[in-house]
Every structure is written in C-alpha cells, then in structure tokens.
C-alpha cells in the first residue's frame, strides 16, 4: 500500500478524464474536521498571511521598479527578510498575520502534517508559496510535504517576499528562476518515488498579462509539473480560454470570492473543464464573522450566550471524541467506562 494514500488517490482522480476535485480551504484541526464531516473528499490548506509594516514598505519601494527583479535584487531583499517569516489561513490562524509571505516551511509543514493525518485517505492540497528558497529549499519542501502525507502542493513565481495573489503590486522572479523551482520539485518527487502532485502556479497575469502567464505555465508543464494554476483569472472568458489553451493539462481554479476572479461555482468550473477547484476562505471566512459576532455579544452582555447544543461534549465530538473513547476501550484502557456525557438531574 502507498505510504501517501491521499497522493495516490488524487493522482488516480486526475488520471480519470471525468475526475474533479472540490477542496474547501481549511486552516486548523477543527475547520478540517468540519469539512470532513460535511462530506468533502479533499481539503485545501490555505497559507494566507500579511507581512510586517517594514516588509510592506519594502514591497512598496520595490513596486516602483519595473518588471521582474534581477537575481541580485532578490538576494538583497531576501537577506533583508531572512529573519522574518512569510504565508492566508495558516498565517492568519497560526500567526495572526496577513498573507504577505510570513509562513516558513516549518509552519506550513507542521500544519499540513496535522491536517493530512486527520484523514490520511482524504487528499490534502497545500499551499507551498514560493517553495521557501532556492532549489535546495524547494527540494526540502517537496520531501517534507510528501513525508507529511500532503497529496499535492502549489509553487508560484512570486519573489520570496510574496503576498496573497489577490493583492495588487506583486513582483515576480524571471521564468528561468521559476522553472528552477518547478524542476527542483519534480526531481525531488522522482527521487522519492512519491505520488505527490506538483501544481505550477503563476502570478504573472496581474503585471505581465495573459500571454506571459501561458508561456510560463507551458514552461512549467515542460519541466514536469502535473497541474497548472493561473492565479487571479479575471473573467469567465479567460477561465474558459486558459483551459482550452493548455488542454489536456489539468488545471486548478482558485475561487477567492471578492478577489480578482468572478464567482464561479464548483459545477460551473467543472463544466468549463477545470479538474480542481479550491475555496481558500471557505472556513476561515465564516469563522471570522461568527467569532467577531460572538465576541461583540460577550462584550455587550457579559456572557457568550451560546446555543444549548453547544456543549463541551458536542465540541469534542467534532474533534474525534467518540473515536478516541473507542480506541481506549478496545485497548482495555477502562478510563471512559461511564462515558463522558453529564447526567442531567
Ligand atoms: C490561495 C492562497 O495562496 C492561500 O494562501 O490560500 C491565497 C488566497 C488569498 O489569500 O486570497 C492566494 O490566492 O494567494
């Protein structure tokens, strides 16, 4: 049996011309448990994070320079950024920061490993940002994600101090540097004999247009990437066009509502010919709204005032309470013989 069931399953789905993957974004254990309980058969781990004020300043300064940065520029920026972290959901939930390249490989791998192992047969697609460095780091990212049970990951062509694909002012590395990232991931996957699916993302659309984006994605396909990802698709026509232009290469649609992309449903994406759709804010969005409302209520009323169904037992059941109790019983542990439900008098 494959060591990475999720990756093998995902690869089989993609090999089936009718296979289509719908992956809601999850950012922590509870959001992943809820997505699994709702019956989704794939998950997407968001990385979304924002940078610290001086990173934003540096990006603002960099944006005044034209086009792609030179390697020297990038090194200079990377050195200045070395002691800082970069990454959307993981960044927001783990660090309370925005999607500005704050998450490190370690942050992302640790979160991915926990998520992938909640249900090892459910493919977890994870954001791998820029790969977190040069070819050596991209190779480590590939190995660590594969060993952690991640089924697929995407690597993009933004500079190291990246930002969410739906913010303006993105800067890119040149095609050669991008392809070096993809090649390093592909070679690493082959060395491991892993089924992990490599998704090549380009952020070129915003600053460099459709043709440059297609040419980058074609080069990534040539270098062995399994799937393509055009970030920030700005119209339905473009969505239909990119599928045709790159056919039969499987493509993923990133459905960030109220970002650069019009709202396209899972069924519509499938009809357009995409093979996968991710919804990065599917859990973190509603969580943010509910938490804010709950906290405002607590501040106002001095009590959270939760619904009666919201018992500690209910919360823990979402997180595998009954399975854990069963495990204890089967091993003869005896700790939970009386169950854990309070008896109401
Ligand atoms: C997909 C993404 O990389 C993510 O971190 O989830 C983000 C989502 C977002 O922050 O809007 C992206 O599209 O860059």
Image (tube, rainbow, N blue to C red):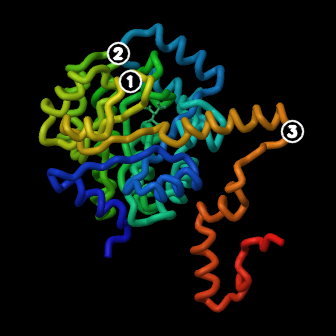
Residue at 46%, 44% (x, y): give it.
25
Q: Secondary structure at mark 3?
A: loop
Instruction: Report x, y in % for residue 47.
Output: 51, 40
Toward the viewer: 337 or 29? Answer: 337
Residue at the far bottom: name it: 332
Q: How many residues crowd mark 2 within 10 Å: few (<14), some (14–19), many (20+)? A: some
Displayed quadrant of residue 261:
top left
Residue highlighted by disc 3? 302
The tag earlier along the polypeptide, 3 or 1, is 1
CA separation, marks 3 and 1? 49 Å
Q: CA distance from mark 3 to mark 2?
A: 49 Å
Residue 109: x percent and y percent?
52, 52
Query: SS for tag 1?
Result: loop
Q: Could you classify mark 1 by the number of other residues whose Cα lies within 10 Å: few (under 14), some (14-19), or many (20 or more)?
A: many
| Residue to which mark 2 is pinned | 207
Res 68 label: none
The tag on residue 172 is: 1
Residues marked 1 and 2 touching at CB (< 8 Å): yes
């Amino acid at each position: 049996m494959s060591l990475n069931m999720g990756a093998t399953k995902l690869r089989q789905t993609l090999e089936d011309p009718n296979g289509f993957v719908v992956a809601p974004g999850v950012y922590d254990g509870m959001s992943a448990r809820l997505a699994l309980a709702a019956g989704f058969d794939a998950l997407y781990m968001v990385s979304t994070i924002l940078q610290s004020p001086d990173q934003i300043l540096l990006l603002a300064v960099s944006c005044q320079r034209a086009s792609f940065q030179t390697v020297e520029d990038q090194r200079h920026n990377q050195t200045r950024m070395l002691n800082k972290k970069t990454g959307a959901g993981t960044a927001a939930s783990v660090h309370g920061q925005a999607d500005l390249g704050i998450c490190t490989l370690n942050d992302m791998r640790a979160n991915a490993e926990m998520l992938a192992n909640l249900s090892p047969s459910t493919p977890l697609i994870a954001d791998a940002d820029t790969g977190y460095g040069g070819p050596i780091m991209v190779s480590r990212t590939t190995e660590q994600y594969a060993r952690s049970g991640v089924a697929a990951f995407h690597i993009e062509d933004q500079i190291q101090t990246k930002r969410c694909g739906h913010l303006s002012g993105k800067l890119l590395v040149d095609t050669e540097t991008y392809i070096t990232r993809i090649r390093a991931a592909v070679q690493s996957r082959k060395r491991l004999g892993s089924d992990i699916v490599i998704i090549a993302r380009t952020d070129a659309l915003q600053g460099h247009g459709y043709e440059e984006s297609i040419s980058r994605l074609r080069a990534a396909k040539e270098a062995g990437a399994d799937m393509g990802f055009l970030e920030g698709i700005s119209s339905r026509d473009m969505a239909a066009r990119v599928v045709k232009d790159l056919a039969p290469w499987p493509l993923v649609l990133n459905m960030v509502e109220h970002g650069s992309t019009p709202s396209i449903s899972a069924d519509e994406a499938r009809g357009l010919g995409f093979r996968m759709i991710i919804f990065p804010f599917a859990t973190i969005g509603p969580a943010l709204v509910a938490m804010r409302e709950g906290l405002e209520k607590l501040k106002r009323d001095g009590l959270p005032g939760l619904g009666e169904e919201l018992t500690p037992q209910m919360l823990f059941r979402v997180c595998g309470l009954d399975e854990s109790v069963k495990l204890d019983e089967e091993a003869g542990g005896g700790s939970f013989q009386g169950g854990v439900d309070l008896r109401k008098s």
